[in-house]
Image (cartoon, helix red, strand yellow):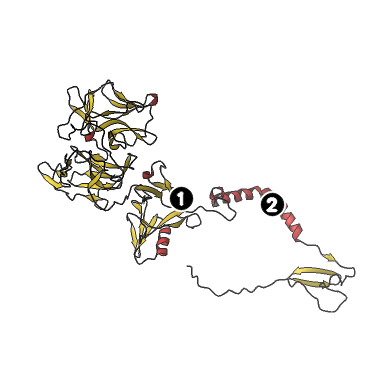
Amino acid sequence: MANALYFPLLPLLLSAFSTATAEQRHSNISRGTSLTPGSNLSWLSPSGLYAFGFYQQGNGYAVGIFLAGVAEKTIVWTANRDDPPVSKNATLLLTTDGRLVLQLMQGQERSIADPDEPASSASVLDSGNFVLYSSDQRIVWQSFENPTDTLLPGQRLTAGQQLFSSISQTNHSTGIFRLEMQADANLVSYPVKTLYTSNDACWSSGTYGAGDNVTLNFDDDGRLYLLNSSSTLLNLTRGVNFQGRTIYLAKLDVDSFFRLYSHNLDEKRSWSTLWSTTTSRCDPKGVCGVNAYSILIGLEVKCECVPGFNHVDPNDLSSGCQRNYTAGGCKNEDGRLNYTMKPLDDTQWLDDSYSVLTNSTKGDCAAACQGDCNCDAVIFEDRLCKLQRLPLRYGRSSPGSLSFVFFKVGVPEYITNGVPPADRPSKKKLTVEILIIGVSLIPFLPGLAMMSRHLLVRPKVDIRREPDVSVTPNFVNTQSSNPVVNADPKLEFSVDHSLVTAQPKSVSHSVTTPPTTPNVFR
């Protein structure tokens, strides 16, 4: 913010400007009064310093409170900050029945405030607070009690209340960090979607258990402090005695820092940072949801899924990731594994292991998970193999990390001809088909038997004529006294004067078993 915001000298008469506790009321905004982006954008505070109404966000408009009279508006509060921007045809209206609503096309409405009772009028105060009044002038709703990412002098954070950072300097939707005034008296900042543990915290005031009903308070001179019911527990900052007209704000920025800023209205300078919670940026762990990890790119966070997973909601990357395949059994029908292990380098995760193997290697660690039906991922570090179940949490990019992470990913099964599993018959289906074919062939068995007998029984060969020895040199010459030359050792010929019959000869086979070779892959 210190580098992004710049305020020229306000062309406003602010000599009467005061940030005293006694707030000056603007002339009443009565029932039936409305604003539109196309013409009447906002209602101003008496000094013109703050405005409540429409401001441009993206290609549309949002409703909020901002510092007016400058070229680049500083947003200090946003209504319904996670709703999409509205078009220039929207109308902000204090209705005749005392509701503050945003009217959209086709009769749709969004509530801007939810007062305890119908509002009779409204005002923008010079403190930056927007209030709704009852008919007897009691405050029935105020923006100071519903903070977003910024505190203004005179505003406080009570036990259980939180600030949430914005997504970016120009997008004021809910971001990835939160600052909470806890009921245990500790003021702590966390990434969103994390647990309330010291391991998850980015920063804390260190005042755990120091008192009851502790609040974070902000004075007009820039003093931030924790106050219990009787005394000051901790001064986060001390008041500053600046000359001239100086304004302050405290903001939970998009980079996780809670900072105190000041700006002198009489000087053409940017905002100055007076104090910050820490000098070390918080790791945005958990902001991408389960089975996903975050990558910091400047002040922006990118969310990526682990191998084999896709985003649950592509429009909400903090929704986490789910498998992009149907998880079947650990092994298929013939006992082969349905999964392989894929590495994901340079990431860190919350270690929630159900089993730890010692003195392991990286390869053995991955193999151990692949063979364990309960394992979904492993973290290997310092020869320790830590077996994990889904979901995995708090993933974040960590270049140079000494840990190695492997994820079990489903493997599509394909046979050699490229037929996918969905088109491949199962063993059960194949057995049924064979039985059907076998039963259908029963009526044809007698005919098949006769045909087989006819083909197998060979007729005797009549060779009463003189054989042509030149044509059949390997057959017996009945006129010769030489031994029979048998070209086929499987056939034996017996000579009976005029007839030659070929008869099968029994052959003995000698099988030699090769020496056993040790299986080095076992």
Residue drawn at point x = 14 percent, y = 32 percent: 22
Residue 399 position (above or below residue 157)? below
Image quadrant of residue 18? Answer: top left
Residue 13 position (above or below residue 491)? above
Whole-percent x and y of residue 519? 50, 70
Image quadrant of residue 312? Answer: top left
Q: Which mark is residue 328?
A: 1
Residue drawn at point x = 55 percent, y = 53 percent: 414
Which class describes the residues within 10 Å of circle 2: few (<14), some (14-19), or many (20+)? few
Residue 489 position (above or below residue 318)? below
Q: Is residue 387 left or right of residue 237?
A: right
Q: Which mark is residue 471?
A: none
Q: Is residue 32 left or right of residue 230?
A: right
Whole-percent x and y of residue 239? 15, 44
Mark-to-mark CA distance, 2 and 1 = 43 Å
Q: Secondary structure at mark 1?
A: loop
Q: Secondary structure at mark 2?
A: helix
Whole-percent x and y of residue 267? 24, 40
Residue drawn at point x = 33 percent, y = 49 percent: 286
* Farthest residue, direction right: 466
In this view of the protein, which residue sits in the foreground, 418 or 273?
273
Which class describes the residues within 10 Å of circle 1: few (<14), some (14-19), or many (20+)? few
Image quadrant of residue 92? Answer: top left
Check the picture and name the quadrant holding the N terminus. Answer: top left
Q: Is residue 358 left or right of residue 223?
A: right
Closer to the camera: disc 2 or disc 1?
Answer: 1
Camera sees residue 375 = no
Disc 2: which residue = 445
Camera sees residue 401 = yes
